[in-house]
Image (cartoon, rainbow, N blue to C red):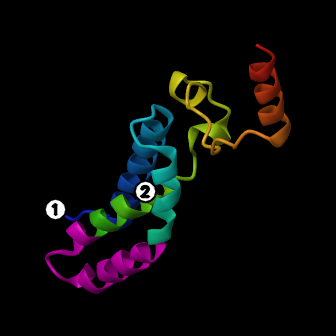
Amino acid sequence: MQVNRGFAFWGVALITAGVVALAIQAALIPEESARQAWRLWPLLLVVIGLSLIASRTPFGLVATLLAGVVAGGLAGTLWPASRTGSTSAAAVSRPSRQPARAPSKATLRSCSTSAAAT
């Protein structure tokens, strides 16, 4: 049986992209981790190159499927919940990532004067 590797690649890539995008929206994959995944984009080039080299060997289909998984995984990270306007509970209830600020001098003075008045 002959398998069309082009269809196999795109089928696996699209399924993986959809699963990853849904996992990000459901907060199963943290959004920050998804953004960091793009640092591994050269891995996509390596896997596609290996797929091309292995295309004439018995491992050609496996290499094509692996390339589809990697491509789909990276493509799925392009749609995090905050960009799609999702209002899922996970996206809404996340705490702010801003660091706590030290109290200003005016706040400290008003606290010390109110403590001295009592």
Magenta stretch bounds: 41-63
Looking at the image, is 73 positioned above or below residue 50?
A: above
**x and y percentages locating residue 102 in the rendered image:** 69, 43
Q: Residues within 10 Å of mark 1 (few under 14, many from 20)?
A: few
**x and y percentages locating residue 67 in the rendered image:** 34, 68
Nearer to me, 92 or 9 = 92
Looking at the image, is 90 positioned above or below residue 24?
A: above
**x and y percentages locating residue 114 in the rendered image:** 80, 20
Residue 62 seen in render: yes
Q: CA distance from mark 2 to mark 1?
A: 25 Å
Tag on residue 72? 2
Outermost residue to the bottom = 53
Nearer to me, 8 or 13 = 13
Which amino acid is tagged 1? Met
Q: Which residue is mark 1?
A: 1
Residue 76 seen in render: no
